[in-house]
Amino acid sequence: MELSGAQTLVDCLKREGVEYIFGVNGGAAMPIFDALYDETEVKLIPMRHEQGASHAADGYARATGKVGVALATSGPGATNLVTGIATAYMDSIPMVAITGQVYTDFIGSDAFQECDVIGVTRPICKHSYLIKNSDEVADVVAEAFHIASTGKQGPVIIDIAKDAQKNETLFQYPETVDIRSYKPQVDGDPAQIAKAAALIKEAKRPMLYAGGGVVLADASEELRELTLKTQIPITVTLMGLGAFPETHPLAMEMPGMHGSCCANYAFTDSDLVVAIGARFDDRVTGNLSKFAPNAKKIHIDIDASCIGKNVQVDVPIVGDAKNVLTELNKLVDTADIDPWRDQIQEWKQKYPFEYEQKGNKVMPQYVIEQIYQHYSDAIVVADVGQHQMWAAQYFKFTEPRKWLNSGGLGTMGFSLPAAIGAQLGCPEDTVVNINGDGSYIMCIQELVPAITMKLPLKIFIINNMYLGMVRQWQELFSNKRYAAVDYHDNPDFALLAQAFGATGLRVEHPEDVEPALLKAKGINDGPVVIDFIVAEEENVFPMVPAGQGLGDVIRGLS
Amino acid sequence: MTFPLNLKNKLLLKNMNKEERHIFSVMVENRFGVLARVVSLFSGRGFNIDSLNVAETHDKSVSQITLVTHGDAQIIEQIYQHLNRLIDVIEVTDLSAGTHVEREIVLIKVSTDDAQKRTEILQTAEVFRGRVIDMKPASLVLEITGDEGKLEAAINIFNTYGILELARTGKIAMSRGVTN
């Protein structure tokens, strides 16, 4: 049957099981939007800004594990997607971003709304395609979904010229995809796995260090089995939170710059670090020359280029975390490391995450604790900044895919549109968006589609009237020279929410925190925004200053 | 792509911090944009390309990129892994890891303003087994094939006569014998 390229594209998306496509319409993508107009299987979600579209697709992917799809027009539409694409790339999120392109004959002529999207996105995507002929559509879509969702996952861009959208083609969807140059290595080398098991057996002070790769590989069960079987203490990174329950006695909580003292001291004293789907990011390791100086390292990663990038590794294992852990679990036993476990427990008890109540202020950490009390089962979507760190510290995650945040790129503005994607992907779950006053206003326009769709998002703003994380660095390292961080001129977010058409509440006193959270629980016919006015100059501790070793962690200012 | 650890182990035996010259043969899908992906991998990470040659192979669907670069063991390992990670890359071989042959062609235009100088240049060219491929009253163009050392030597010598123009193909290379 002859179909237009645009109709073919939509039919391909159906074959891939796409439920939602997040987009903003524009000239060079009009045929695709037109094909979606009567479509019921693939639902088009009109966002208010293309950045919101790419973050929403990303949030949907993080919450469900399925490929998120964003759609925009050429030129500015495509460049507006870029931040969201880079965000997904840094955190290895499966996404397909579709952009309209000017007519083939106009490509390269500086036509109206023309941009070399393939060129612009080359370093921030897993792969990209320019479709100039409608006959290519089906094969490209099938390949794009295959590439986005296998191996090290990531965003794939499909840039499709307007004539390729309009011209007709015979629809034939490939049943299987076989790309000769793309064969991800998913099974770990058995000899390497045996070596890893032997090192684990010998170690006196071993620790597990799990990251977002465990969540992406859906390997939380296997990680739990490894931890419980060996009884080795575990730290889970910002990207992996929930892969292992933070409430378990073996959990040392998050490591790194704002991680727990326990995890950081453990790295410094450990004699064996088992990294699983974690990439020795600079926010985790601190000064590399002081990082885990006495430890041998085992590194399990789907991406060979991640291994040995930052630290030298003794036993590299390239493979999918789920497969590798399944094999490794067969070879390990309870570790005979009681003195080390006692040491970990001592650190844990001595140095918990803690803060001081200051006057009658609403403390940001208290708000997070209360959110945890009342929304412990929710999917929590955080933005970037101090509130993100407090949320990671004080909310105790116990399940994977319940904590979504932009860890790699650190994209402010991510969370509100990502929460929309998460809520659509998981309609039965409560979705809590923990935001900052700086980051909320970066994508505030996406409140509109959330209201239109009556999504019961709980949007909690930790409002300290500053770009708080930068202000904290200025306080500690720049002599309180608060350049460009004063946000006292922000509007009243509660009133603004009401103007948009949502419920808006403002909380200024500690005793009002809990009632407001309870009230929000009862509002389910649309988003509710609570603006928590918190202590302005509260800092995130512990903190490992940039350039310092993990052992030099500052526990607080006294 | 089952390779990662061989090269690593081999490299670990050498001095980790010593900068070494490496020559990669990269087999890629013959489509537009592939070279840009390879090159932007280098520019985005601040790695150097010393020489680059791209051409179709006997299989029209495959192009071969021969790329000379340098760096310490860790950088070379990263280059190898990142090349392998590109979707359109079919195979990457570090030819420097084994025995190989490499060649490059240089075209040199030298000025020959008097007969005696021309004779000298022609004699010198013979030493390098150079061929004259164009001759004009005041200049001639030589074609010389060889490895890096030979071409450097030739260029140094002809520089003393006055090189008017110079063009090089970049290295092409191949492993010796049959490998799996």
Image (cartoon, grey):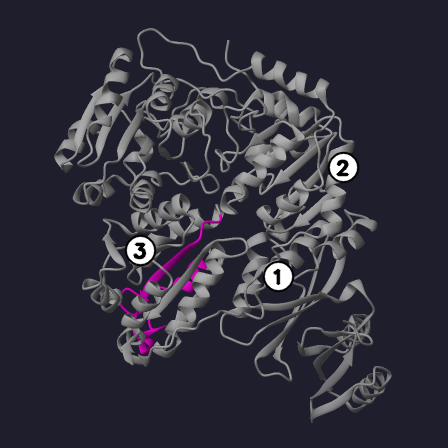
Q: Label 1: which residue?
A: B83
A111 is within the stretch colored magenta: yes
Residue A74: which disc?
none
Measured in 3D between alpha carbons, the distance from the residue under mark 1 to the one under mark 2, in whole angstroms, is: 31 Å
For the point 31% across and 18% down, the residue is: A534
What residue do we see at 76% from left, 50% from top?
Answer: A191
Q: Is residue A11 left or right of residue A189?
A: left
* Residue A116 is at least partly visible in this image: no
Q: Are marks 1 and 3 in contact (CB under 8 Å)?
A: no
Question: Disc 3 marks which residue?
Answer: A19
Residue that carries the numbered disc 2 in the rendered image: A199
Q: Residue at x 46, y 30 (%)?
A: A398
Q: Helix, strand or loop at disc 1?
A: helix
Q: Which amino acid type is shown beneath numbered disc 3? A: Glu
Q: Dot 3: within a 10 Å radius of its alpha carbon, few (fewer than 14), some, or many (20 or more) residues?
A: some
- Going from N to C along the chain, the mark reached first, 2 or 3, is 3
Q: Is residue B72 left or right of residue A187?
A: right
Q: Nearer the viewer, mark 1 or mark 3?
A: 3
Circle 2: residue type: Leu
The boundaries of the magenta stretch are A92-121
Residue A222's place in the image compared with A303, above or below, is above
Q: Is A182 on the left or on the right of A205, as rendered?
A: left
Disc 2 and disc 3 on one polypeptide chain? yes
